[in-house]
Amino acid sequence: MGPYATQTLGDMGADVIKVESPGGDITRQIGPIKHEGLGPVFINANRSKRSIGIDLKSAKGKAALLKLIETADVFTYNMRPHTMAKLGLDYESVSKVNPRIVYCGLFGFGQSGPYGGRPAYDDLIQGASTISSLIQRSTGEIPRYVPAAIADRITGLTAINAILAALIHRGTSGKGQKIDVPMFETMTKFFLNDHMSGLTYDPPLDKGGYIRQLSRDRRPYQTKDGYVCALIYNNKHWTNFFRAIGRENTLTDDPRFASVTTRTQHINEIYAEVAELFKTRTTAEWTRLLDDADIPVTPMHTLETIFRDPHLVATKFFEHEDHPTEGTLVHMREPTEWSDTQPRANRHAPVFGEHTAEILAEAGYSQAEIAAMLAEGAVLTADAPEAEGDI
């Protein structure tokens, strides 16, 4: 959550200082690794940042962080609030140092409820916020998790919105504030926005769930030679579809297709019938037919074919970077298009503690003071011995 949110802010131009405890961010160790401490999960969520290693259990280390906070706009953390309080970095303590600070915490649960102190990870939140049960309901199989850290990423995006809005508020009021971004509540709102359905009313009109999204045949359509993703959704789509396959009378002859309401009521059987139709032509044939009929269609990509997608190639979505230690890397550019201040990566993903001395010097520490702090282990660089823990 935190790394994804702050990387995006960094791409937008923020000077992001990543504070790492001895041992560094645990994601440095995940995935196939060329050099210790720079795994792909870390690389893909930590560009456009500087790294400083600080032992926050050291008085001098904590003092160094508080000195950085004095001139910071935003303080973001990705831990449970009670851990921050133990470190003396709760909002009350931080805001005394800098009353204008926007203090944003990303963690599992809202602090006013009984789950407030619990640890949380993406998998847990997916299950708790109904995602796994919705997958079970739509597939008829066992509950599963989405094969991506979707709760982390969505919560991170939510934090970006909150941080930027708080900065706008500070610009007009002069006041900083504390923002909590809990995963559980964020993801529950995200998914129930569609699936409240009849539960929107009191008393309820049904047991909830958006029936079209839960249909077992709402999936890529199998063709003669592969799969294709298509959505025949509104009246125009259905009219064009049946005309293209030579069945233009279906909309008038079959009452199931009469309206959005009737199609929704019969969506399972409709999707099942369409799935059988798609098996009669190749992927290329369906893509041409649907394109000509102005019906939304895309390829079903894999982790191999996505890099060859002609649209992503044309828009230069995947970029190559020369990393000082990892060689050539492939990264994804910021997908939004800006007319003036286009966000882009401005720093490579840092080695642990790569910028410790540089950041401390900017904060006003002398070279002798920095050397003494390094010798004591209050702050750390890439050459410092590793210890347990991460922040």
Image: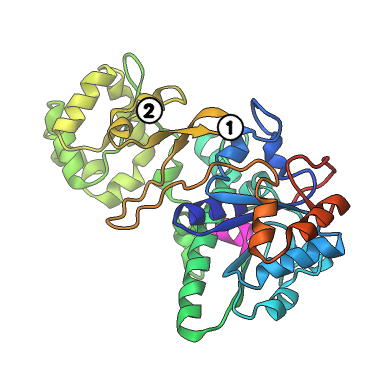
Q: How is the image coloured?
A: rainbow
Label 2: how many Cα within 10 Å (few below 14, some 14–19, many 20+): some
- Tag 2: amino acid: Met
Q: Which mark is residue 300?
A: 2
Give the camera-side residue of 265 and 218.
218
The image quadrant that residue 70 belongs to is bottom right
117 to the left or right of 308? right
Against 160, residue 48 (above or below) is: above
Q: Comparing marks 1 and 2, which lies closer to the viewer?
A: 2
Main SS of residues in magenta? helix
The image quadrant that residue 194 belongs to is bottom left
Against 391, residue 199 (above or below) is: below
Dot 1: element: loop
Q: Which mark is residue 141?
A: 1
2 to the left or right of 335? right
| First in sequence: mark 1 vs mark 2 | 1
Which residue is depicted at the point 66% across and 45% down?
Answer: 354
Spatial CA distance of label 1 from label 2 is 22 Å
User: Residue 152, image x and y in percent?
Assistant: 59, 49
Q: Is residue 1 visible?
A: no
Q: Which residues are magenta?
A: 181-188
Against 196, residue 4 (above or below) is: above
Residue 187 shown in magenta: yes
Which residue is depicted at the point 39% across and 45% down?
Answer: 212
User: Residue 387, image x and y in percent?
Assistant: 85, 43
Residue 332 shown in magenta: no
Q: Kindly indicate whether the residue at mark 2 contacts the one at mark 1 (C-beta within 8 angstroms).
A: no
- Tag 1: amino acid: Glu
Label 1: how many Cα within 10 Å (few below 14, some 14–19, many 20+): few
